[in-house]
Amino acid sequence: MISLLLFVCDHHRFYELKDKIKSSTYLAASIMQQLSNSREDKQLTQNDLKRITFASCLNLFHSNSMCYPWPLGIYPVIEWLYAKRLSDDNYQWQSSWTAISTATEKGNSLDDFLGYSIGSVTIKTKSQIFSIFPDLTCSRDGDERILIRYWYRRSWKNYSKNKLGFFLLEPQIVPGQEWIKDLFTYRLIIVPKPGLFPAKQE
């Protein structure tokens, strides 16, 4: 009976975390679409994406619990995959990521805890885009898509399933991501407002 009770608790916690990462993904997408509304320059910057990452994870992490030394044993990561169709077989492409992944405590500002990589803008073929994710392909020249992939990543320092509220179940590593130990993931493809992407470094 005790084991059954613990399993029920783990089952509830598992789906609670899946729901939280889904809602974080939708929140990140919503903030992304609205953040630069009041600016003359609509293009998103590295700092915009970093702050979206921070704001979108607050439904699970409170105060600075997503920061080093990661008391929950995990931290959030967002990958931003942008594709714009230039012609039938040519796409503008940018792959970027943001994370609260600083491995040492450097200071007290938000920027001290936020890692990022803003990728270079390159050209890919339609088949290359399709192989990354089929729904990123577009039907008309000038159409854009952005794939937002959200993860909770296990910290190398102090991960434990008990810190996430599990007693019996062990959250599984996302398939294909074994080398970086990602737990729970959600993908969302949307059409970004014109001018938001590609993101730029500041």
Image (cartoon, rainbow, N blue to C red):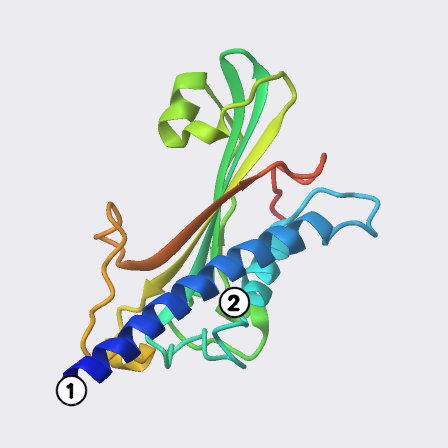
| Residue depicted at x 36% and y 78% | 72
Q: Residues within 10 Å of mark 1 (few under 14, many from 20)?
A: few
| Residue depicted at x 38% and y 54% | 185
Please say whether residue 158 is visible from this viewpoint: no
Please say whether residue 49 is visible from this viewpoint: yes
Write down the quadrant of residue 31 in the picture. bottom right
Q: Nearer the viewer, residue 35 or 101?
A: 35
- Image spot of residue 198 (x, y percent): 61, 36
What element does badge 1 sit on? loop
Q: Residue furthest top?
A: 88
Mark in the foreground, 1 or 2: 1
Question: In the figure, 115 relative to 109: above or below?
Answer: above
Question: In the figure, 126 relative to 83: above or below?
Answer: above
- Image spot of residue 18 (x, y percent): 40, 62
Question: In the figure, 5 relative to 145: above or below?
Answer: below
> Looking at the picture, which amino acid does disc 2 mark?
Cys
* Residue that mark 2 sits on: 57
- Image spot of residue 123 (x, y percent): 50, 22
| Residue depicted at x 52% and y 61% | 24
> Looking at the picture, which amino acid does disc 1 mark?
Met
* Residue that mark 1 sits on: 1
Q: Quadrant of the N terminus?
A: bottom left
Whole-number angstrom distance, CA of label 1 to CA of label 2? 35 Å
Q: Nearer the viewer, residue 159 or 9?
A: 9
Decide if residue 44 is on the left or right side of residue 117.
Answer: right
